[in-house]
Image: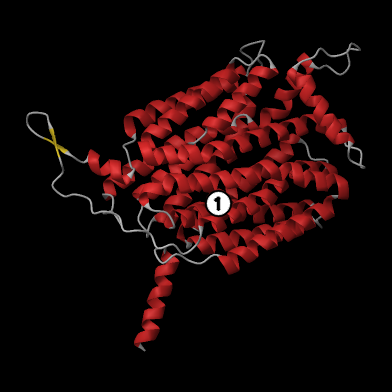
Amino acid sequence: MASPVDPSTRKRVLRVIFFSLLLDLLSFTFILPLFPKLLEFYRNAEAPLDDGAPPSKTLLTSVLGYLNAYKAAFARPIDSRYDIVLLGGALGSLFSLLQAIASPIVGTLSDKYGRRTALLASMAGNILSVLLWVVAVDFRTFLASRIVGGLSEGNVQLATAIATDISDANSRGSTMALIGACFSIAFTFGPALGAWLSTIATVAANPFATAAGVSLFLIVTETVYLYFSLPETLPSMAATATATTKTDGSKQPAEKKQAPAAPVQRTNSHFLLNLVHMGFLLFFSGMEFSLPFMTYDLFAYTSAKNGRLLGYIGLVASVLQGGVTRRLPPLVSVRVGVAACLASFLLLARISSVSGLYLAATGLAITSATVVTGLNALSSFEADEGERGGKLGALRSWGQLGRGLGPVLFTSVYWWAGRETAYAMGAVGIAAVGVLTLVGLKTPPASVGGRKAVKVEDEKKKL
């Protein structure tokens, strides 16, 4: 293993990661509560339902035609109010599937050319994506914005790789929890801020230009901040950067060279970790997407009430990540989260009260605070320094594949067979993921839990 990063450098880089990722995720979450009204705006402009005239042939009318054909295949009638929700879900799935394609490429490039270079290139794509949203007066331009964003969004996985570069075995779990906290904070406040900004009209042709403009401002600010504040953290390149400068301005190697990294002794296969990540998000994302349908059917929830429910989940997850998750060994974190997810699925299949809904939401908050954070940490322990970007990118790719397919598959069962069957099926799927985590995954020796186990075993041998 390479020599540890200086504590002051680690603290500085962590601060840069935290603030930049928070800006990025706040910008990303602005659009989430706007999807229904945003897509409704494009539909009214390009495919109106009540003007009596046949709609003109546009990209949006073609997409809606395919979605209506899909909806008509179900035995249970699906209310037309869900047309926009289905379209939003289709765009969300497209974004995730594009991420599944791009993530391994971004990660591998960061291993070759450095984290900083890859992150700044990703930011350039993000700026273009949000700029397209600012000028999106038609659905075609908005779709282009989502495609560019899906292919270029590498901030999360690169922030994870950077956090891994600068953390040792003792601090790995708490560092990953810090990244998870960024998610929870952003998803707690970002959607509400985006919804408020959407009420401020600045451009008649694009009613959402204010939210898009503020999002663009945050992304540009983040890019400038990263350019001036983020050092290179890829161990092989960071070691080169420590060269000192002679009095004549030329470079010379630092006096103390970094020792070559020892090969990692793998405890868990990356295939198994990736499979667990994909399986978990396949069912979890399906549940997330179906939740507004369920709350509307059972409790006639409005968007505001659903927003409060999601805000509660984000707030509880933030508290847990700040106080609990960062202290748990990664494998324990994953197992606790999967167990909480299973309990929530079982509750959602049977609940008939708002108190039951919030009890299930508490389990989902625990899940949000633990599983992905733990899997990222486990994957980082199983990767050599020169391949972490690629391995973490592959982990994210498999997860995004599950996130892309989950909503379509889960809601199909929801409409074909009903709520109880859908959530019972989800419970069975999460239980299978739980078995994989209990039987298949083991604690890496380098992690906190692994070192404790080795220490106990050594003590037994002495006795």
Q: Is residue 13 above or below residue 365?
A: above
Location of the C terminus by quadrant is bottom left
- Can you tell which quarter of the image residue 130 is in? top right
Q: Is residue 231 above or below residue 338?
A: above
Q: Residue furthest bottom?
A: 463
Foreground: 107 or 342? 107
The residue depicted at 78 percent of the width and 54 percent of the height is 423
The residue depicted at 60 percent of the width and 56 percent of the height is 276
- Can you tell which quarter of the image residue 420 is in? bottom right
Q: Residue furthest left?
A: 247
Residue to which mark 1 is pinned: 372
Inspect this view and state whether residue 218 appears: no
Q: Amino acid at mark 1?
A: Val
Q: Is residue 384 above or below residue 435?
A: above
- Mark 1 crowdedness (10 Å alpha carbons): few <14, some 14-19, many ≥20: many
- On the image, the x and y values in percent for residue 58 come to 76, 16
Q: How is the image coloured?
A: secondary structure
- On the image, the x and y values in percent for residue 25 come to 53, 35
Q: Is residue 39 above or below residue 74?
A: above
- On the image, the x and y values in percent for residue 281 come to 64, 49
- On the image, the x and y values in percent for residue 96 come to 62, 38
Drawn side of residue 382 relative to residue 406, left or right: left
Total number of numbered labels? 1
Foreground: 31 or 438? 438
The residue depicted at 39 percent of the width and 44 percent of the height is 162
Q: Secondary structure at mark 1?
A: helix
